[in-house]
Image (spheres, grey):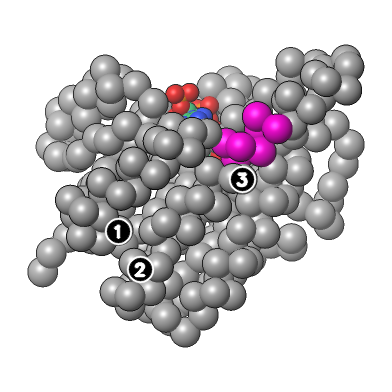
Amino acid sequence: MQPKIAVVTGALKGLGFETARQLARQGYQVILTGRDAARGKAAQDQLAKQGLETEFRLLDTADLHSIEQFTTDVLKEFGRVDVLVNNAGIMIDGEKPNTLREYASVIQRTFTTNALGPYLLCRALVPAMVKNGYGRVVNVSSGMGQLSEMNGGYPGYRMSKTALNAVTRMFADETRGSNVLVNSVCPGWVRTDMGGKGATRSIEQGAETIVWLATLPDGAPTGGFFRDKKPMAW
Ligand code: NAP
């Protein structure tokens, strides 16, 4: 049987790298993606030392041309994508905007990476999944995007993750009954560059539910939001 093909965005460090590593260990043909070819090669080398062969392709999820190029090339070269992990994300609200113009810039840049990029990747890759009768999409969201627990602050990050959850719901609806399962996940507070050293979870723990959703069996839930493999409120 051919291995399943998994695309992970933002896969050169943090949760993306660990998700890619765990999927490769499970026998998936993993396509690491990122914005820097030299770092891509370094990530591949690191995995190769653990006996894990992977592919690397350039993909900047904030760049429409990069998304067009990547999705066209990957479908042409591999014929299909079975798993898409929309992991790449930024949290730049810490730039502490003062003027409306600065707020607009932070919020727009965050939306472009955290919500529009995943939407466009789904738009390009999900139809092929539906055609193949198999697909798993994992949108790496955050509890900070939960409407039911919405607090103030971090407007770019919070709104972009709420929007990402909307992407999950839209594609789950569009693909219902096709064996394409589309879910959101909150990895918890994880010790990555984004989460910081004081975070409560290791990267391995943070990746666990992402990988679980990426490898769900047929008939499993779609259109949900999960933390620690359990549904959570939107
Ligand atoms: P991280 O270590 O900062 O990694 C973020 C990744 O996203 C990096 O690989 C980064 O690439 C990539 N990225 C950012 N902008 C990109 C772009 N335009 N194109 C391609 N890749 C891009 O953070 P992380 O904690 O692993 O975050 C992974 C995901 O988990 C994010 O979506 C984040 O919002 C979510 N999350 C994290 C936590 C936490 O506590 N850490 C909690 C909830 C949700 P570069 O290396 O090139 O910058």
Q: Earlier in the sequence, mark 3 or mark 1?
A: 1
Dot 3 corresponds to which residue?
115
- Position in image of residue 33 (x %, y %): 34, 36
Q: In which quadrant will I find the C terminus?
A: bottom right
Left or right of residue 44: residue 62: right
- Position in image of residue 68 (x %, y %): 39, 44
Dot 1 corresponds to which residue?
81
Residue 110 on the magenta span: yes
Q: Are marks 1 and 2 in contact (CB under 8 Å)?
A: yes
- Spatial separation of the CA atoms under disc 3 and disc 2: 20 Å
In this rendering, is residue 5 above or below 145? below
Q: Residue at x 74, y 31 (%)?
A: 107
Q: Which residues are magenta?
A: 108-114
**Magenta highlight: main SS:** helix
Q: Earlier in the sequence, mark 3 or mark 2?
A: 3
The three-letter amino acid code for the residue at tag 2 is Met
Left or right of residue 58: residue 160: right
Q: Nearer the viewer, residue 167 or 72?
A: 72
